[in-house]
Image (cartoon, rainbow, N blue to C red):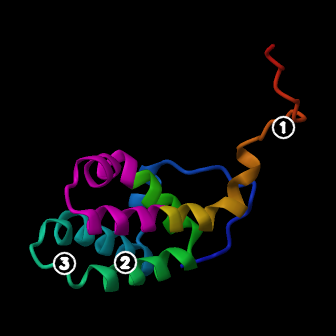
């Protein structure tokens, strides 16, 4: 994995990430697919915390992997199926942790892409008589 991502680098489409053959990226993709498509549907989820920790370690090392994970989560319907439709609270919580972790890694690198309007000064609410 490479942490070298220029803050102004253009965001690549999901297809570009899926064509990457870096060993670390392939391992991350395989791990994510295993957690979402296999472990999420398993009766015994005792390995889920360990898998999530491992995926978080990989995501922490690579903003490129974080971008892939967030794009893949949306494109493959993982967000909908695991946060909205999933009835297993532990799975929803762990998947949300992965999403938040990936977003937290990308935040300092991509914050400039999302201009924030200055906050208006607070005004006192009108007094109703």
Magenta range is 73-99
Report the residue at 76% width, 50% height from top: 112
Q: SS of the residue at dot 1?
A: loop
Q: Residue at x 12, y 79 (%)?
A: 44
Task: Name the residue located 48 percent from the left edge and 82 percent from the top edge.
Answer: 57
Q: Say whether disc 3 or disc 1 marks the residue closer to the N-terminus.
A: 3
Question: Residue 119 bears which disc, if any?
Answer: 1
- How far is disc 3 from disc 1 in space, using C-alphas? 44 Å
Looking at the image, is mark 2 or mark 1 earlier in the sequence? 2
> Are the two marked residues, 3 and 1, in contact with CB atoms closer than 8 angstroms?
no
Kindly report which numbered mark, 2 or 1, lies closer to the viewer in this rendering.
1
Residue under numbered circle 2: 52
Q: Which residue position is annotated with label 3?
A: 45
Q: Write the residue at 41% across / 77% down.
A: 55
State yes or no: discs 2 and 1 in contact (Cβ < 8 Å). no
Residue 72 seen by the camera? yes
Distance, label 2 to label 1, CA atoms, is: 37 Å
- In the rendered structure, does residue 119 fall within the stretch colored magenta? no
Q: Is the magenta stretch mostly helix, strand or loop?
A: helix
> Circle 3: is it few (<14), some (14-19), or many (20+) Cα within 10 Å?
few
Extreme-left residue of the structure: 43
Q: Does the magenta stretch include residue 90?
A: yes
């Amino acid at each position: 994995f490479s942490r070298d991502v220029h803050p102004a680098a253009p965001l690549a489409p999901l297809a570009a990430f899926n064509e990457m053959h870096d060993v670390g990226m392939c391992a991350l993709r395989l791990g994510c697919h295993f957690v979402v498509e296999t472990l999420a549907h398993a009766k015994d989820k005792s390995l889920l915390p360990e898998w999530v920790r491992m995926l978080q370690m990989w995501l922490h090392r690579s903003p490129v992997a974080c971008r892939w994970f967030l794009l893949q989560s949306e494109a493959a319907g993982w967000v909908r199926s695991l946060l909205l439709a999933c009835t297993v609270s532990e799975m929803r919580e762990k998947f949300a942790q992965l999403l938040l972790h990936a977003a937290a890694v990308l935040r300092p690198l991509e914050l400039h892409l999302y201009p924030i309007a200055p906050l208006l000064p607070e005004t006192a609410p009108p007094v109703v008589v």
